[in-house]
Image: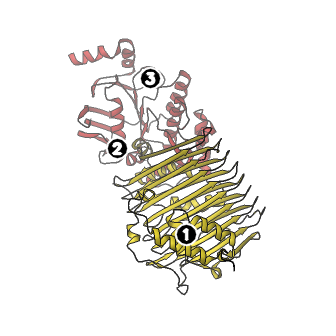
Chain colours: A yellow, B red
Amino acid sequence: MSPDTITLSSVQNRAQERFAETGWPAKKAEAWKYTSLENLVSASLQPANDISGAVATPKEIAGPHCRLVFHGGQFRDDLSDALPAGVRLVMLGDDESALAAIDELGASDNLVSRLTVAKMTAGISLQVAQGALIDRPVMLQFVGGAPAASSHPVIHIDIGDGAHFAYAEHHETNNRLSAPFIVVRVGAGAKLDHVKLQLENAATHHLGLTCLSLGERADVNSMSLSLGGALSRLETHVRLEGEYGELGLSSIYLGKNDQHHDMTTRVAHEVANCNSRQIIRGVLDDNARGVFQGQVRVAPHAQKTDGQQMSRALLLSRDAEADAKPELEIFADDVVCSHGATVGELDETHLFYLQSRGIDEAEARAMLIDAFLVEAVAEIRHQGFAELFRPFLSGWQVPHKG
Amino acid sequence: MALLEIKNLHARIGDTDILHGINLTINRGEVHAIMGPNGSGKSTLSYVLSGRNGYEITEGDILLDGESLLEMEADERARAGMFLAFQYPVELPGVGGMAFLRAAVNARLREQGEDEVDQLGFVKLVRAKANELGIKDDMLKRAVNVGFSGGEKKRYEILQMALLNPSIAILDETDSGLDIDALKIVSEGVNSQRGPEIGMVVITHYQRLLSHIVPDFVHILSAGKIVKTGDKSLALDVEENGYSDMMENANVA
């Protein structure tokens, strides 16, 4: 073995060294200004390594997908379905290019990439063959866990040039911390549909990082729902690396009680002629807090970039709070970029109109909340994923306010 | 028993008193017009009757079929038979028109202890009523009032009234923003719903609506009080002589 051969343990060692140096983000760290990790830092977390525990039964999410199950942070082949033809699963340690990508991202200044690679509880790599048109979505299911445990699955997905692939994530663990790190390379002309359902247990902290890179004419449509957990951050970094790339990156967060939802995105237009479009909608009740941080960076040569970002939050309670930090960094001159962020309440005239027609207040509020979300939901391109998604919105009960 | 009784009604918004003791009795089958200049309290009256939040009733009562409405929310009043056609119908982006109409009709049916309508039968019913009012299918598919012209919004109000089958309908300046053709269509829609079971209150600034929807009684509202009551010829008086004459005379009297 030559000294610069990349191995799983060398990648992990480097991540451990980096994490030992930097540790958790300082209280004043700009990237964590709105989201405090104090509760996690003070907890003594045990990376999950127990595969003997009873198997939790997650919510059945119907659909034609094949499941890959991560139970208590471990990948469980025995609980997983066979993958469709054209998709190959290998252990992360056996995929050098995946390891190299993980290693490079682990070197960046990001908490989750460092932490999760350092404390990795599972690592797999999915390879979608060039030109493969995969009809059947893959469902990554993260379940089980223990209240003092943390899970750190690392998943690399390589979508070959011209391939079509769809995957969903279903997070419903009982861990103290669930911190999945997912890296996706979308090849030239490849198409990806993605949906993420964050339905963690009420005490769980979820810090998820997804890094996407898009090749020329790659086309990605992604939607995330943050619904569960005590505190969550769904962070997505996207690099548009080939011309004519198309990115739809939308999200919805629904918070109540003391929940904290943080949606952080970083979209880098590295080359010309790419489009990115982000629609973010949040609804917050009780003392819930929502954060949207969206950075769009347009490199000097990335002319004809079209980058759109619109974040809207709806507050149902006086004690709820929403913060938005859009950041545009544009170094090219021939671009169309826009961003907007609004925070508002349900419109009293809208409520009155519905009630004047005999619709009671609870139903009227539910109708107006649905209406507020409908534009974001409409962003989901994949029909099956749209159907998967909707029940979680209508199931979000809105308590009647007297 | 009277259908709607408004007894010595006083109402205010914040520190501003708007209604200063309104008395009005409406029986089934009657159409009452309430006319008055801007600021006389016409819209406040319509909102107070339909139960909009933000208005404080300081004195008096409103009875529908002998039951006080004061403790009832807007939706309870609507299910009890109250309907308000808005002067400015509200646009509800993202709220599908058909789902909205169906929710409203089903809420009323549930209250009456009847079965909810099935989707297919409901679509047929709506289309038939919409057709009479010159409302195109395309409008029914859109979000509530979104992208409708002023005239289309008013027709959509009358469609809702036809579907909800109220016992008392308040039409708040239904003529505002309508050209003469739209005014005729809307008036015909209202007239087709007149009958021995329904009472109507037509609130308007101008006489012209009342030559299409001919009232049984005309009341002049000024500074939060009814200052004069008469038959349809009173509306013509207003048209000829304006409100100021009448208000002066009322003060003298």
Residue mark closest to the camera, 3 vs 1:
1
Find residue B33 and report its image quarter: top left
Task: Say what secondary structure mark 1 lies in.
Answer: loop
Label disc, if present, on residue B65 of the rendered structure = 2
How many neighbours does mark 1 have within 10 angstroms: few (below 14), some (14-19), or many (20 or more)? many
**Quadrant occupied by the N terminus of chain A:** bottom right
Q: Is residue A388 above or below residue B82?
A: below
Q: CA distance from mark 1 to mark 2?
A: 63 Å
Q: Does residue A58 show up?
A: no
Label disc, if present, on residue B210 of the rendered structure = 3
Q: Are marks 3 and 1 on the same chain?
A: no
Q: Is residue A314 above or below residue B162?
A: below
B77 and A131: which one is in front? A131
Residue A58: percent from the left, percent from the top?
Answer: 55, 75
The residue depicted at 66 percent of the width and 59 percent of the height is A193
Q: Are marks 1 and 2 on the same chain?
A: no
Q: Identify the mark nearer the N-term, 3 or 2.
A: 2
The chain under label 2 reads B
Find residue B46 and report its image quarter: top left
A136 and B114: which one is in front? A136
